Structures are given as C-alpha cells and as structure tokens.
Image (tube, helix red, strand yellow):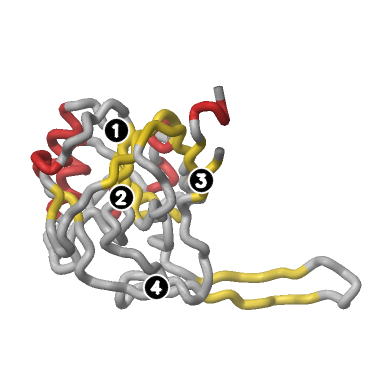
C-alpha cells in the first residue's frame, strides 16, 4: 500500500505568514480540442511537504540541490505522539522504541493545511541530539516547522545542522498508522535554494519486498 503524505498544493494551502503563497499563472492554452497548456508558478520553496536545506539555517552551508539524497529514501518509522500544542517534543515523551534511521512524527497539532494555526508542536534540540546518537539521519514532522512559531532562534534547526540530521516539514500523517515503511521524499535539485517541495510517500513493506 502507498500513502501519499504530501498535502495537495493548491492556492488554498497556507504558507508561513509573510512567505510567498502558491500562485498559478496560465501562460498559454491551445484550442479546446488540444490537451496542451503551459503554466507558471510563483511560490516559496517551503511549500507543503518540503525538505529544508542546511543553507536555510546555516551560513555557507549546502543548498538543497547539493544535499545527499540518501536520507530521503529508505526504511522509515512513523510514531504518533500525544503532545500539547505549542510544546517542544522531548526524548522522555517516547514510549515506542526508535528503530529506524528515518523518523516521522505525527503530532496532530497542525490539522488543516488551509488554515495556519500558530500553536503547533515542535522538536526540542535535546531530542535531535538524542536521535542523532541513536543513528537517526532524517526527522520529519506534520507541522510547518521543527521549531515553535515564536522561536526566532531556530534552536531545533540549529541542532539538526550541528548533528547532520536532515529535516522534512509539513507532512500529512493523519491517515498513517505507526510502524515501519519505506520513505520516498526526494527534493528537487534546486541549486542555491534553501529548501524544496517534495512529493513524499510511504510504502508498506509488502509493497516493495
């Protein structure tokens, strides 16, 4: 079975306040009996399900087009957490053992991608350090950021940078059960850019084995 964990990219999708929302511009449309159209888009690269680049939160660090793709593809564990809104997820919250190098966290604190709520949960720097010591190379979350909305210091982002942990944000995990999957969430090769939208999917083991 395949789970699409990317929210639909429409003009109703809310982006970070002050960022550039998605807009489609139709450039040409041929005769009615032809199937060809040409469109252009304008948008932040932090759109929907997306991968942050080290250059987003670290000066002189690699852009998303320079990043190794290996963290974004492979065995992945989904864990559901019951956490308060506007709280940081700490290591002591986990009841399920972490057994994969890629970890996706479902918090349920950003339930509607067409309505931006500022009180979503986020990661603590301590959690990222613990995950790194356990061999985690990618962490993803179902909120717009691994940091709290009010945290301009980007503490969790910087912890990820210091520990070499890749980040996925804006995932859609409401219909995904806890367990092991294969993750495919490849960023575009956008040279010089600080992030990239991804078409993130999860495949169950019997789908690919």
What is the C-alpha distance between the residues marked 3 and 1? 21 Å
Whole-percent x, y for residue 74 in the image? 44, 30
Identified at 31% across, 28% down, the residue is 100
Q: Quadrant of residue 97?
A: top left
Mark 1 or mark 4: which comes first in sequence?
4
What is the C-alpha distance between the residues marked 2 and 3? 14 Å
* Dot 2: element: strand
Identified at 38% across, 50% down, the residue is 51
> What residue does disc 3 label?
3
The circle on residue 14 is 4
What is the C-alpha distance between the residues marked 4 and 2? 19 Å
Asked if disc 4 and disc 3 are in contact, CB closer than 8 Å, the reply is no
> What residue does disc 2 label?
106
* Dot 3: element: strand
* Dot 4: element: loop
What is the C-alpha distance between the residues marked 2 and 1? 18 Å
Mark 4 or mark 3: which comes first in sequence?
3
Mark 4 closeness class: few <14, some 14–19, many ≥20 residues within 10 Å: many
What is the C-alpha distance between the residues marked 1 and 4? 28 Å
Q: Is residue 92 depicted above or below 24 in this figure?
A: above
> In the picture provided, is 86 more to the left or to the right than 28?
left
The mark closer to the camera, 4 or 2, is 2
Whole-percent x, y for residue 164 in the image? 24, 36
Mark 2 closeness class: few <14, some 14–19, many ≥20 residues within 10 Å: many
Q: Is residue 45 visible?
A: yes
The mark closer to the camera, 3 or 1, is 3
Mark 3 or mark 1: which comes first in sequence?
3
Q: Nearer the viewer, residue 109 or 145?
A: 109
């Amino acid at each position: 079975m395949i789970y699409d964990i990317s929210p639909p990219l429409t003009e109703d999708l809310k982006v970070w306040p002050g960022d550039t929302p998605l807009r489609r511009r139709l450039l040409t449309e041929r005769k009615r009996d032809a199937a060809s159209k040409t469109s252009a888009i304008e948008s932040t690269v932090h759109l929907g399900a997306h991968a942050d680049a080290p250059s987003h939160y670290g000066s002189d660090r690699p852009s998303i087009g320079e990043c190794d793709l290996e963290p974004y593809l492979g065995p992945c564990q989904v864990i559901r957490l019951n956490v308060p809104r506007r709280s940081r997820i700490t290591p002591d919250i986990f009841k399920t053992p972490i057994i994969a190098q890629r970890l996706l966290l479902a918090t349920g604190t950003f339930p509607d991608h067409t309505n931006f709520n500022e009180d979503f949960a986020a990661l603590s720097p301590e959690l990222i350090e613990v995950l790194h010591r356990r061999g985690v190379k990618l962490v993803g979350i179902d909120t717009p950021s691994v940091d709290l909305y009010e945290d301009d210091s980007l503490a969790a982002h910087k912890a990820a940078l210091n520990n070499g942990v890749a980040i996925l944000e804006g995932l859609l995990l409401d219909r995904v059960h806890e367990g092991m999957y294969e993750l495919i969430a490849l960023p575009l090769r956008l040279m010089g850019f600080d992030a990239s939208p991804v078409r993130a999917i999860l495949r169950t083991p019997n789908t690919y084995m």
